[in-house]
Amino acid sequence: MPNHIRSVAVFCGTRPGNDPAHRAAAQALGRGIAEAGLTLVYGGGGIGLMGAVAEAALGAGGRVRGVIPEFLTRIERPYAELTELEITTSMHTRKTRMFELADAFITLSGGLGTMDETVEILTWRQLGLHDKPVILLDIAGWAKPVVALIEALIAQGFVDPVHRRLYQVAPDVPTALELLRTAPSPEPAAPPERL
Ligand code: AMP
């Protein structure tokens, strides 16, 4: 891994989804992150794809840092064996902490929470607040409607076509990890680009 990428945040669902390919990808991703010597940063939960990524990373001897708001500890049930669990006071501080702790972001399949986290990290990059890689994993076609929505917004003149560079799509876990391995060093924080 390049020196500037030591940790990766994974955004993914609290549910496993209908297609078993999502859970298999979550397990492969957790394992792959650990084997690459990276720290996994994630939402701290022990359920759905979130739990599967964390369990696989820990099983492969990796470091896992969970970040969860206090009120969600009863619902998302933090994974007991985490290397570190940070409890925040709100969803906003959770996202801020995950952003601060991670050198790159991978979105695996998930629901509205996963979408929220992904769109926010893309908008922060659009604004020049960071230049960390954002990779969308397209497992069982999960990312296709997300990319189609962004393309529709470009076609309608609401997103500058230059912002296609804000993210990359990987068809599988090995490709996502390869994209991290070859990621260029981030540009220093720049003034906001044309929106
Ligand atoms: P989901 O994709 O809906 O299963 O949610 C995935 C994760 O995103 C869960 O840990 C949710 O608690 C989290 N999440 C949902 N909405 C937000 C939000 N507004 N800010 C931060 N995390 C969120």
Image: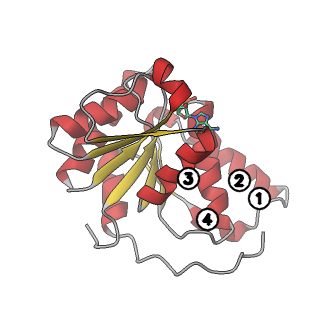
Q: Mark 2–mark 1 contact, CB under 8 Å?
A: yes
- In the visual, does 150 lie left or right of 169? right
Q: Which residue is mark 3?
A: 96
Q: Which quadrant of the render holds ligand 1?
A: top right
Q: Quadrant of residue 115?
A: top right
Q: Position of residue 53 (x, y in %)?
A: 33, 35
Q: Nearer the viewer, mark 3 or mark 2?
A: 3
Q: Please report the residue visible at 30 percent of the width from the left and 62 percent of the height from the top.
A: 6
Q: Nearer the viewer, mark 1 or mark 4?
A: 4
Image label count: 4
Name the kind of residue labelled 4 in the image: Arg
Q: Quadrant of residue 154?
A: bottom right
Q: Which residue is mark 2?
A: 151
- In the visual, does 165 lie left or right of 11? right
- Find numbered disc 3 in the image and state the secondary structure of the residue it sits on: helix
Q: Earlier in the sequence, mark 1 or mark 4?
A: 4
